[in-house]
Amino acid sequence: MVSKLSAVLNTTVTHSYKAPIPKGCTREAAIHLLHDHDFLLRCDKLLTQCTILSLDGEPLLPDNIKPNQVADTKLYKIEDLVDAVPAGLWGSNVESMGEYTDLREGVFIRVSSPLSVVAETEWKVMNRNGDLEVGYESKIFCSRALVSLVKGRYNESLQETLAMVIRKLAESGN
């Protein structure tokens, strides 16, 4: 009964996007940038504070992620300043936990936020017809009541991060 009710009250939304990597940038440089957790965290314009924490036990990684893992998962406490959700459901200061797992082709990020919101995003560098691309695939798990708000804010954040990744790669030129 609980799982049926959960299926009615909760939902999953997905989003993906790819962009070409500037000419002259190497695959290794792009992957190295995706492994720079501090850079990725600072791409979040709502970030007010970030603290690295100790990870207790093994993270629960999706089946397609674990074989590609190249480093231990790092756990961050992430504090964002966001507009309050109507009816006061969510305050201005939102504290989330982010797990960052470096992969051969990029990074897997799982962010767990209040109100049972969980976002999983895999960022990776791909080769398409001889040209390099960087992109992401994301899944958001949350209540149906919050889905439009969470999806809009999260997708906006992903697009801003992607733009900053492309800009940083263009500036570095390697």
Image (cartoon, grey):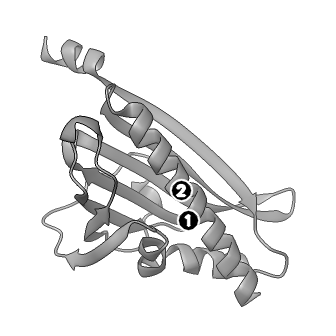
Amino acid found under the numbered disc labelled 1: Thr
In the depicted structure, whether residue 87 falls above or below residue 92? above
Residue lying at 31% horizontally and 63% vertically, measured from the top left: 81
Residue tagged 1: 161
Binning the other alpha carbons within 10 Å of mark 1 as few (below 14), some (14 to 19) or many (20 upward) gives some
> Could you say whether the residue bearing mark 1 is in a helix, strand or loop?
helix
Q: Which residue is mark 2?
A: 158
Q: Does the rendering let one see residue 174?
A: no
Q: Quadrant of the N terminus?
A: top left
The one nearer the camera, 6 or 79, is 79
Q: Residue 155's x, y, as percent?
A: 52, 48
Residue 32, x across and y down, in percent: 56, 80
Give the residue type at disc 2. Leu
Residue 26, position as x, y percentages in the image = 74, 80
Decide: marks 1, 2 in contact (CB < 8 A)?
yes
Residue 91 appears in the picture as rendered: yes
